[in-house]
């Protein structure tokens, strides 16, 4: 038995080595195909030290950064090989692969980088912090009430671009001796102004409901998934009304731990397929595509589990319900939006259509979602967050100029002459 196990392990290691070699060869080839960066051109860099598994963290910033680059040229500095491969294929912004610190240093020396953005807390961020004479700015990859949002690592950055009042209040509870007025700049969620993807259906009189459950979780405290408890009954009820169009976007890991979730997930997908065959005008959607945004913006009502999808939806200021976990061990934050959200209990599934009607027409429910949307993101009217994002960058550039004037002699040999 030990010999068989060792053979299997050796085969897996051999396959991994072959895959890594192929990936390295492909990356080398693609890197050589990239046009050289124009010296002194870029004022802003996005430092991404992760691999492709966390590409979602930078993808959501593509469109806001493309818009920003019209004023301040932006380049992505990729440290991970698998991420670089993906970025070379899909990024709408210039990308350079800086695997080693030496490569990073060489690139920095040739550019006029004044602001460095960070979308996560990767340990390799520390390697970039060594470069002074520029602002290191944490922009994060979402807004939520998770512990991740209250880490003392915020202090490592010169500035942080936060969503709004809720984020500041959350940080004020845990960060000591932190200058919030200067270092924490609220911008809302500019991604909400640039939701990607096109509608896979033709809008009509049907009420569009986005059901975006998370997976079952790998521990009792995080058992937030509703597919097995709420999902099948919820979908059956909405299909039966004939008045609703369902967009079903489950977490890609649904069913990896508990097969009951996998079975329920497959049943929901089958129900949608059967409903579309019975009535092609229904155009229900099972969505497992890479684009995220159109679903959140297009839905009249969203039903989500406890996950980041709650806060993405809040940024639109549109009606939202949260499924109440059936497990008593699931940890629920008593502060923030979850203290006052519209809960969908498992024993209310047969009335979910009535709940939806109430959310769409009840003045108190509408006012409540508006309050919490403002609390987390400020003004959510189209374009407002983008304007605040650009204003924050303009402020940081002005601060850079002010400090550069003070330390002009120290900057003499910093970068080549910039054409911009």
Image (spheres, rainbow, N blue to C red):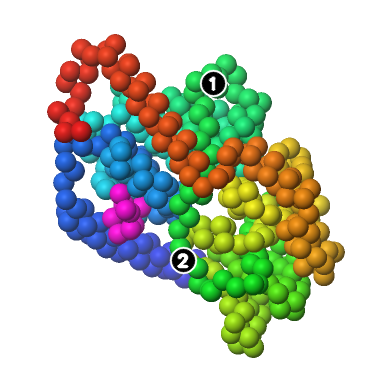
- Of circles 1 and 2, the one toward us is 2
Q: Is residue 183 magenta?
A: no
Q: Give neighbour class at mark 2: few <14, some 14-19, many 20+ (Cα, 10 Å).
A: few
Identify the residue under disc 2: 198
In this picture, is 74 found above or below 225?
above
Principal SS element in the magenta part?
helix
The residue under the point 37% across, 21% down is 399
Pick whichever, 111 or 107, lies toward us: 111
Residue 407: which quarter of the image? Answer: top left
Sequence order check, earlier mark of 1 and 2: 1
Asked whether disc 1 touches disc 2, contact meaning CB atoms under 8 Å apart, the reply is no
In percent of width and height, residue 115 lies at 34, 31
Residue beneath the point at 22% across and 18% down: 411
Residue at 51%, 36% (x, y): give it: 187
The reply, left or right, for residue 410 in relation to residue 262 is left
Which residue is most to the bottom?
Answer: 278
**Separation (CA) of disc 1 from disc 2:** 39 Å
Q: Where is residue 54 in the image (x, y as percent from the top left)?
A: 45, 51
Quarter of the image holding residue 242? bottom right
Q: Is residue 91 magenta?
A: yes
Quadrant in the picture for the C terminus: top left
| Residue at the disc numbered 1 | 181
The secondary structure type at the circle numbered 2 is loop
Residue stretch rendered in magenta on the structure: 83-93
Neighbor class of circle 1 (other Cα within 10 Å; few <14, some 14-19, many 20+) is: few
Query: Which secondary structure, mark 1?
Result: helix
**Closer to us: 56 or 3:** 56
- Vertical comparison of 377 with 194: above or below: above
* Residue 8 seen by the camera: yes
């Amino acid at each position: 038995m030990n010999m068989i196990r060792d053979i299997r392990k050796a085969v897996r290691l051999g396959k991994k080595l072959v895959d890594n070699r192929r990936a390295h060869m492909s990356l080398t080839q693609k890197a050589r195909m990239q046009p050289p960066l124009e010296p002194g051109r870029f004022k802003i860099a996005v430092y991404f030290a992760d691999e492709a598994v966390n590409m979602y963290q930078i993808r959501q910033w593509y469109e806001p950064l493309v818009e920003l680059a019209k004023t301040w040229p932006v380049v992505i500095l990729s440290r991970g090989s698998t991420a670089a491969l993906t970025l070379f294929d899909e990024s709408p912004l210039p990308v350079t692969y800086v695997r080693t610190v030496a490569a990073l240093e060489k690139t920095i020396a040739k550019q006029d980088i004044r602001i460095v953005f960070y979308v996560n807390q990767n340990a390799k961020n520390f390697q970039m912090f060594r470069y002074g004479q520029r602002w290191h700015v944490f922009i994060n990859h979402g807004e939520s009430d998770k512990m991740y949002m209250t880490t003392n690592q915020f202090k490592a950055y010169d500035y942080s671009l936060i969503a709004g009042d809720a984020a500041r209040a959350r940080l004020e509870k845990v960060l000591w001796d932190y200058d919030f007025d200067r270092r924490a700049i609220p911008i809302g969620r500019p991604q909400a102004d640039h939701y990607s993807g096109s509608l896979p259906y033709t809008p009509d009189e049907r009420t569009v409901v986005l059901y975006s459950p998370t997976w079952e979780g790998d521990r009792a405290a995080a058992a937030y998934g509703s597919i097995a408890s709420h999902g099948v009954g919820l979908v059956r009820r909405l299909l039966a009304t004939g008045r609703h169009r369902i967009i079903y976007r489950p977490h890609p890991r649904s069913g990896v731990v508990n097969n009951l979730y996998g079975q329920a997930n497959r049943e929901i997908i089958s129900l949608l397929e059967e409903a579309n065959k019975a009535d092609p005008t229904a155009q229900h959607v099972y969505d497992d595509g890479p684009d995220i945004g159109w679903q959140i913006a297009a839905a009249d009502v969203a039903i989500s589990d406890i996950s980041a999808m709650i806060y993405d939806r809040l940024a639109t200021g549109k009606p939202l319900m949260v499924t109440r976990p059936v497990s008593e061990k699931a940890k629920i934050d008593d502060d923030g939006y979850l203290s006052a959200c519209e809960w969908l209990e498992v024993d209310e599934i047969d009335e979910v259509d009535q709940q939806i009607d109430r959310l769409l027409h009840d003045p108190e429910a509408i006012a409540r979602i508006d309050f919490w949307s403002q609390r987390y993101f400020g003004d959510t009217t189209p374009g407002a967050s983008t304007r605040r994002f650009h204003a924050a960058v303009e402020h940081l550039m002005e601060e850079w100029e002010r400090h550069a004037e003070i330390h002009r002699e120290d900057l003499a040999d910093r970068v080549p002459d910039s054409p911009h």
